[in-house]
Image (tube, rainbow, N blue to C red):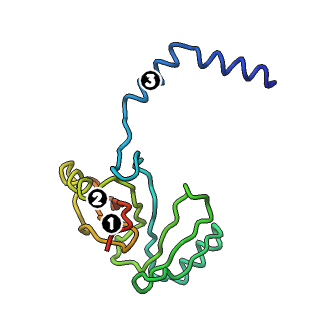
Amino acid sequence: MSMKETSKTNAKASTNPKAEGKAKAKAKAKPPATSANEGPVPASIVWFEIPAEDLARAQKFYRQLFGWKINAFPGAVEDYYHIDTGGDDASPDGGMMPKMHPAHTITNYILVPSVDKGAAKVVKLGGTICKERTAVPQMGWFVICNDTEGNTFALWEKDESAT
């Protein structure tokens, strides 16, 4: 398709009242969460953790599979590693740690405006809190949760004043 044809197609699409109505309805349906400090906060996955029985074996696997860089996380607890996925800033990095129990699975960290409000909502909706609000100094706060189906996930609140 030529640039001229593309422009005509785009012009038609933008003047289509039915398409505009759907777009407006979609925009009204789900307003973004907001943070007083940073504006809109999408409920995006911002970090993940991979538990491993054998850290060296797991590191080798993920390095060879995806080309990830995995190194000790400075200032973190012992045996905690940063996973640099190599993507742009929108691509989440992660951590690797020893497996805490046999059912310990990959945990995704989801950005929220407030872990306290998020945790209260988890409980209200039938989920449970596995680990209460915990600071990652100069980075933020997290809460580990289980949903109604027993799946583990974490809430993450960005806060550089966390101690």
**SS type, badge 2:** helix
**Type of amino acid at the residue the image marks with label 3:** Lys
| Residue 73 in view here | yes
Residue at image point 49% right, 78% down: 81
- Residue occupied by mark 2: 115
Of all residues, the one furthest to the right in this rendering is 2
Q: Is residue 153 visible?
A: no
Residue 49, x across and y down, in percent? 44, 69
What is the C-alpha distance between the residues marked 1 and 2?
7 Å
* Front residue of this view, candidates 159 and 147: 159
Instruction: State the CA–CA distance, disc 2 to disc 3.
Output: 30 Å
Instruction: Decide if residue 57 is on the left or right side of residue 134.
Output: right
Label 1 to label 3: alpha-carbon separation:
35 Å
* Circles 1, 2 touching at the beta carbon (< 8 Å): yes
Q: Which quadrant of the view contains residue 118?
A: bottom left
User: Which badge, 1 or 3, is on the more N-terminal residue?
Assistant: 3
Please tell me how crowded label 2 is: few (under 14), some (14-19), or many (20+) other residues with Cα within 10 Å.
many
Q: Which quadrant is the C terminus positioned in? A: bottom left
Residue matched to label 1: 141
Type of amino acid under label 1: Trp
Nearest the viewer among 161 and 18 is: 161
